[in-house]
Image (cartoon, helix red, strand yellow):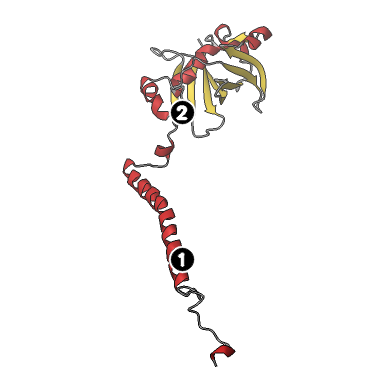
């Protein structure tokens, strides 16, 4: 049985690459699952392969877990379509979109056709892996990641490197602000004290004021 060797790359992450050998009579679903065996992603999300040209333009679609719109359009299912049905070029290309809600786009290119299987190998087989796949944005299918999910919630204070011991600093700022009205009142009182001290008429009755005029001479 002939083998297809595909090179799979992320469209937006040039440093991540996988090479996967798949039997020619295996399905697009087999390739779909093999890709995510290599990325560590949960494969159970709506996705599609598109027959592509050298410019990665999307052509005929082959889908997995289709929505009602795709069902109504009669889009072929990955489960039912063998790879050999769409290999008519020695460098056949497929544009692949995984998880339409939070999509990753891939370029899948046939690198070579191998005529003989390797004895004892289970196919599909990931034969080369370069670079770490980006996080699946909360959809990583591992118990460790699932357990850690609540910690991924956004925490403003943690994001700002907040330390509970800093709470004292916040209190001090609050206390200073609270004292401001009293300080203002003290300043106003002081102003009034000096203002009264130098007032022209303070402490004098009308009769005590000195008189200047002709009657004193």
Depicted 66 relative to depicted 129: above or below: above
Depicted 61 relative to depicted 171: above or below: above
Q: Earlier in the sequence, mark 1 or mark 2?
A: 2
- What's the distance in space between the residues labelled 1 and 2, CA to CA? 68 Å
- Within 10 angstroms of label 1, few (less than 14), some, or many (20 or more) residues? few
Is there a contact, CB below 8 Å, between mark 1 and mark 2?
no
Q: Which mark is residue 135?
A: 2
Q: Residue furthest left?
A: 165
- Horizontally, residue 51 falls left or right of residue 185, namely right
- Horizontally, residue 90 falls left or right of residue 39, namely right
Residue drawn at point x = 50 percent, y = 80 percent: 209
Is residue 188 visible in the rendered structure shown here?
yes
Residue 142 is drawn in which quadrant? Answer: top left
- Which secondary structure, mark 2? loop
Q: Which residue has dot 1 on it?
A: 192
Tell me where residue 191 appears, x and y as whole percent.
Answer: 46, 66
- Which secondary structure, mark 1? helix
Residue drawn at point x = 39 percent, y = 48 percent: 174
Depicted 183 relative to depicted 201: above or below: above
Depicted 158 relative to depicted 196: above or below: above
Tell me where residue 206 appears, x and y as whole percent.
Answer: 51, 75
- Horizontally, residue 58 falls left or right of residue 170, namely right
- Within 10 angstroms of label 2, few (less than 14), some, or many (20 or more) residues? few
Quadrant position of the C terminus in the picture: bottom right
Q: Which mark is residue 148?
A: none
- 46 or 75, which lies in front? 46
């Amino acid at each position: 049985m002939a083998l297809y060797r595909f090179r799979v790359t992320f469209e937006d992450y040039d440093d991540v690459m996988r090479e996967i050998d798949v039997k020619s009579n295996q399905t697009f679903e087999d390739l779909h699952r093999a890709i995510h065996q290599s990325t560590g992603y949960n494969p159970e999300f709506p996705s599609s392969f598109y027959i592509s040209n050298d410019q990665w333009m999307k052509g005929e679609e082959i889908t997995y877990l289709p929505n009602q719109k795709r069902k109504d359009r009669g889009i072929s299912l990955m489960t039912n379509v063998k790879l050999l049905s769409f290999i008519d070029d020695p460098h056949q290309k497929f544009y692949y979109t995984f998880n339409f809600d939070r999509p990753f786009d891939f370029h899948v290119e046939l690198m070579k056709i191998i005529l003989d299987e390797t004895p004892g190998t289970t196919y599909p087989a990931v034969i080369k892996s370069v670079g770490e796949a980006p996080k699946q944005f909360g959809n990583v299918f591992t118990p460790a990641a699932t357990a850690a999910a609540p910690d991924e919630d956004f925490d403003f204070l943690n994001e700002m490197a907040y330390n509970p011991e800093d709470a004292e600093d916040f209190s001090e700022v609050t206390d200073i602000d609270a004292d401001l009205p009293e300080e203002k009142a003290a300043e106003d009182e002081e102003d009034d004290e000096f203002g009264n001290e130098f007032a022209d008429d303070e402490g004098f009755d009308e009769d005590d004021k000195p008189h200047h005029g002709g009657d004193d001479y």
